[in-house]
Image: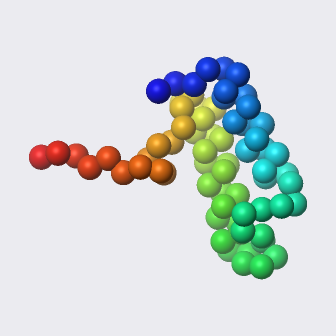
Amino acid sequence: MTLKKSHKILLVLFGLIYLISPVDLIPEFLVPILGWVDDGVILYVIYHLVRYNRLPWNLFFNKKKKP
């Protein structure tokens, strides 16, 4: 499923705002390694969205192949 251009721009902007803002889901000053991991996931999602014009659903859902 591809996204509309306006949705793509909004998602990228929200991701960048999250990265810039001092408020994080996992703050870096409490747990440094995990704090960087959540920022890394956001960066990966933004990159995948810009590169492939879709969200990386493999992060959220596992599709099991049928034999």
Total numbered circles: 0
Q: Is residue 11 above or below residue 4?
A: below
Left/right of residue 2 with respect to residue 37 in the rendered view:
left
Left/right of residue 23 with respect to residue 53 in the rendered view:
right
Residue 20 spot, x, y in % from top left: 85, 52
In depth, the one of 35 and 60 nearer the eye is: 60
Residue depicted at 57% across the width and 25% down the height: 3
Looking at this view, name the residue that lies furthest to the top. 5
Q: Is residue 64 above or below residue 10?
A: below
Residue 42 spot, x, y in % from top left: 66, 51
Q: Quadrant of residue 34?
A: bottom right
Q: Quadrant of residue 40?
A: bottom right
Left/right of residue 44 with respect to residue 28 in the rendered view:
left
Picture colour scheme: rainbow
Q: Is residue 40 above or below residue 5?
A: below
Residue depicted at 72% across the width and 28% down the height: 9
Residue depicted at 17% across the width and 45% down the height: 66
In depth, the one of 27 and 44 nearer the eye is: 27
Residue 37 spot, x, y in % from top left: 64, 64
Residue depicted at 60% across the width and 35% down the height: 49
Looking at this view, name the residue that lies furthest to the left. 67
Q: Is residue 12 above or below residue 33?
A: above
